[in-house]
C-alpha cells in the first residue's frame, strides 16, 4: 500500500463516518434535553406539578449525550490534553505521541471499563432494572448499557486514530483525513 487510501484507509474512513454520524445525531439530544429541562422547570415552579419520569429523562439524555459522543470528541481531538510541548511538535511526533497514548492508555482503560462493567450491565438487564422512584423511568438497564456503548465507540474510534497515526508515521497518510491540527472554536 503506497498511501492511506488502501484497505487501512477505507477502514479508518468507515469508522470515521460512523463516528461522525453518531456524534451529529446525538448532538440533537442536547436540544431535546434543554426543552425537557425547561418543561420540568416550568411545570414545577409555575404549576407546582412534578413528573419524576420527566426529571429522570434529563439524566438519561445527559448520559446519552456524553457517553455516545465520546468517540466523536476523540475523532475531533476535543478531549482534554496538556499540550505545552505537543503543539510545537512535528506531525510525525504528534502521531507518535497519539499512537502511544491510544495503545498505552485509551485501549487498556476502555478494555478495563468494559470488562468491569459487563456484569453490572448484564445483571441490570437480567432483572430489567427500573427506577427506584415511583413513577420513574423503568429502564435503568438501558442507562447502564450506555457504559458499554461508550466503551465500544471509543475503542472503535481509538482503532481508527491509532491506524491513522500509524499511517502518518509510515508516511502513507494520503487519502485519510488527519484531525490533529483542527482548529478549536
Image: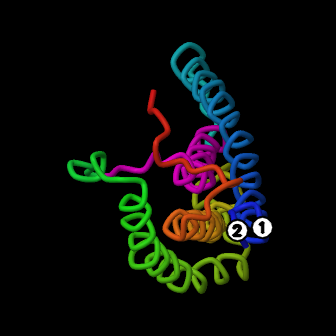
Q: Determine if the magenta segment contains residue 39.
A: no
Residue wearing tag 1 = 6
Q: Residue at x 36, y 53 (%)?
A: 90
Residues tagged 2 and 1 counted as in contact (Cβ below 8 A): yes
On screen, 74 above or below 157?
above
Which residue is nearer to you in this view: 73 or 88? 88
Question: Residue 129 sits in which quadrant?
Answer: bottom right
What is the residue that sits farthest to the top in this orientation?
Answer: 46
Query: Compared with residue 49, is residue 150 higher up or lower down, i.e. above or below?
Result: below
Query: Does the magenta run of residues contain 57?
Result: yes
Q: Name the secondary structure under disc 1.
A: loop
Q: Quadrant of the N terminus?
A: bottom right
Query: Picture coordinates of residue 113 (x, y %)?
Result: 49, 77
Residue wearing tag 2: 2
- Tell whether 45 sits left or right of 91: right
Q: Describe residue 155's horizontal placement relative to residue 83 as left or right.
A: right
Dominant secondary structure (helix, strand or loop) of the stretch shown in magenta: helix
Q: Residue at x 67, y 68 (%)?
A: 141
Label of residue 122 in the image: none
For disc 1, the neighbor class at 10 Å (few under 14, some 14 to 19, many from 20) is: some
Residue 54 position within the rendered picture, expressed as x and y whole percent measured from the top left: 66, 38
| In the rendered image, the vertical position of residue 112 relative to residue 144, given as above or below | below
Residue farthest along the front direction in this orientation: 2
Q: Which residues are magenta?
A: 53-81
Residue drawn at the location 32% of the way across and 52% of the way down: 81
Instruction: In the rendered view, tell whether residue 183 sits above or below residue 172.
Output: above
Callout 2: few (<14), some (14-19), or many (20+) C-alpha neighbours within 10 Å?
A: few
Residue drawn 64% across the image and 70% down it: 152
Of helix, strand and loop, which one carries label 2? loop
Asked if residue 118 lies left or right of residue 106, the reply is right
Amino acid at each position: 500500500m503506497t498511501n492511506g487510501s488502501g484497505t487501512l484507509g477505507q477502514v479508518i474512513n468507515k469508522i470515521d463516518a460512523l463516528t461522525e454520524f453518531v456524534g451529529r445525531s446525538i448532538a440533537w439530544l442536547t436540544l431535546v434535553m434543554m426543552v425537557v429541562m425547561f418543561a420540568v422547570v416550568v411545570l414545577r415552579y409555575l404549576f407546582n406539578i412534578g413528573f419524576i419520569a420527566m426529571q429522570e429523562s434529563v439524566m438519561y439524555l445527559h448520559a446519552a449525550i456524553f457517553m455516545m459522543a465520546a468517540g466523536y470528541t476523540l475523532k475531533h481531538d476535543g478531549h482534554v490534553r496538556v499540550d505545552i510541548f505537543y503543539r510545537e511538535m512535528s506531525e510525525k511526533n504528534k502521531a507518535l505521541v497519539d499512537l502511544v497514548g491510544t495503545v498505552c492508555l485509551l485501549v487498556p482503560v476502555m478494555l478495563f471499563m468494559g470488562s468491569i462493567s459487563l456484569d453490572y450491565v448484564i445483571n441490570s438487564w437480567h432483572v430489567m432494572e427500573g427506577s427506584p422512584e415511583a413513577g420513574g423511568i423503568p429502564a435503568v438497564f438501558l442507562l447502564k448499557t450506555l457504559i458499554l456503548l461508550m466503551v465500544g465507540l471509543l475503542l472503535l474510534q481509538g482503532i481508527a486514530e491509532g491506524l491513522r497515526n500509524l499511517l502518518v508515521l509510515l508516511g502513507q497518510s494520503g487519502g485519510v483525513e488527519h484531525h490533529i491540527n483542527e482548529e478549536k472554536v
